[in-house]
Image (cartoon, rainbow, N blue to C red):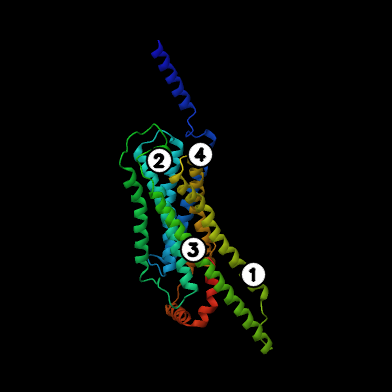
């Protein structure tokens, strides 16, 4: 009788533990986060496919600059995250405990890949803009060596994907009894791979802030110099055009706003995820699972924010996007006009005065 009583109490306590499982998500949390991830998936696929299609329609198979190549690479990264990483996270939330160890391993690998690839792609874009604006005549990222930078970037992304697989494939048993968060952090499994993509994020954040701060100072200095030269021209030449001070100040305010928006978007969206990923290495708290998923959903929002900031906010992209039909029906000409435009473009690129006049506009996304 005593044994039966003990077994009954054990069964009852086990049932209570299952009912009060701290790692089981509430239905409201699953619905809200599932809808958010679904919206991010659709918005990310639509926005990034639009960027890639517009680029292909205007440039064909050729990519004519390192900046275009890095922006295309960023769109490919965001499209990959939208099609792989976000659906995996949504499936993890919906299935909760009914997942296998291989699913948990693959999900961790996609999260590591998403963090690493997004940070490195943004770092390449920031470095290219820094070299284009601050050092236009001493650039190291030209079109010829762009494939090498992209190859190194994707090699690091591959390392970020392989580290979770190598760290978690040993001891891939015991599925279905706990969530991925609990199973991965059980004794005997190393999760130091999270420090890899957290370190990549920190390095990319420092590089990005440094580049855009330097770009902002250089562009502001050139705007002030141009305004001073225009004032001198108005004083010395009676017939000189009127100085558009309001337009220059408006351009400076727009440049400041866009610079802060780019930096803050990257920091606000990815900093919580990187912080929680570092905390789960040293802390063992059940509430971190919910916080980790919320921060991950926030980080995924960059899949549709990046096209808006780096593509749709650019005037040349908007013109190509809105006026593509007009460009398709416009007559090409006899060929001499095209040659003339190429010659003028080459002279403009070689002329330091033209570069100085265009560098302020290039500082904007």
Callout 3 environment at 10 Å: few (<14), some (14 to 19), or many (20+)? many
Mark 3–mark 4 Cα distance, whole angstroms, equals: 32 Å
Residue 156 relative to residue 363: left or right? left
At horizontal 42% and vertical 14% (from top left) the residue drawn is 5
Q: Residue furthest front?
A: 2
Q: Quadrant of residue 342?
A: bottom left
Callout 4 environment at 10 Å: few (<14), some (14 to 19), or many (20+)? few
At horizontal 55% and vertical 78% (from top left) the residue drawn is 357
Which residue position is annotated with label 1? 250
Q: Residue furthest top?
A: 1
Q: Nearer the viewer, residue 62 or 27?
A: 27
The mark nearer the N terminus, 2 or 3, is: 2
Which residue position is annotated with label 2? 185
Tag 1–tag 4 contact (CB < 8 Å): no
Q: Residue furthest left?
A: 170
At horizontal 48% and vertical 39% (from top left) the residue drawn is 285
The mark nearer the N terminus, 4 or 2, is: 2
Callout 1 environment at 10 Å: few (<14), some (14 to 19), or many (20+)? few
Mark 2–mark 1 Cα distance, whole angstroms, equals: 52 Å
Mark 3–mark 1 Cα distance, whole angstroms, equals: 24 Å
Look at the image and tell me whether residue 13 can be seen.
yes
Q: Is residue 16 above or below residue 344?
A: above
Q: Quadrant of the N terminus?
A: top left
Which residue position is annotated with label 3? 208
The mark nearer the N terminus, 3 or 4, is: 3
The mark nearer the N terminus, 3 or 1, is: 3
Look at the image and tell me whether residue 325 can be seen.
no
Which of discs 2 and 3 lies nearer the camera? The answer is 2
Mark 2–mark 3 Cα distance, whole angstroms, equals: 32 Å
The percent coordinates of residue 172 (x first, y second) are 32, 38
The mark nearer the N terminus, 1 or 4, is: 1
């Amino acid at each position: 009788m005593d044994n039966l009583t003990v077994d009954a109490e054990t069964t009852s306590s086990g049932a209570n533990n299952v009912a009060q499982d701290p790692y089981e998500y509430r239905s409201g949390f699953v619905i809200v986060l599932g809808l958010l991830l679904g919206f991010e998936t659709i918005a990310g696929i639509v926005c990034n496919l639009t960027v890639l299609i517009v680029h292909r329609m205007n440039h064909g198979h050729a990519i004519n600059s390192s900046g275009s190549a890095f922006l295309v690479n960023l769109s490919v990264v965001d499209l990959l995250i939208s099609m792989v990483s976000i659906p995996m996270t949504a499936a993890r939330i919906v299935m909760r405990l009914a997942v296998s160890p291989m699913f948990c391993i693959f999900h961790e690998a996609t999260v590591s890949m998403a963090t690493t690839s997004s940070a490195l792609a943004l770092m390449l874009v920031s470095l290219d803009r820094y070299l284009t604006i601050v050092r236009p005549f001493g650039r190291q990222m030209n079109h010829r060596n762009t494939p090498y930078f992209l190859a190194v970037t994707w090699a690091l992304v591959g390392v970020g994907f392989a580290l979770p697989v190598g760290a978690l494939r040993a001891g891939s048993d015991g599925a279905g009894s706990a969530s991925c968060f609990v199973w991965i952090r059980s004794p005997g499994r190393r999760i130091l791979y999270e420090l890899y993509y957290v370190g990549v994020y920190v390095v990319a954040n420092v590089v990005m802030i440094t580049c855009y701060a330097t770009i902002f100072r250089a562009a502001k200095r050139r705007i002030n110099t141009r305004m001073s030269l225009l004032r001198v021209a108005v004083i010395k030449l009676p017939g000189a055009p009127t100085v558009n001070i309001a337009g220059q100040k408006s351009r400076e305010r727009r440049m400041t706003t866009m610079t802060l928006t780019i930096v803050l978007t990257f920091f606000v969206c990815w900093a919580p995820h990187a912080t929680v990923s570092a905390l789960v290495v040293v802390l063992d708290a059940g509430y971190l699972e919910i916080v980790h998923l919320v921060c991950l959903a926030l980080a995924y929002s960059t899949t549709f924010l990046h096209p808006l900031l780096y593509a749709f906010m650019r005037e040349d992209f908007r013109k190509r996007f809105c006026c593509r039909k007009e460009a398709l029906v416009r007559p090409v000409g006899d060929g001499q006009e095209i040659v003339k435009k190429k010659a003028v473009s080459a002279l403009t690129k070689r002329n330091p005065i033209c570069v100085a006049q265009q560098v302020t506009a290039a500082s904007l996304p």
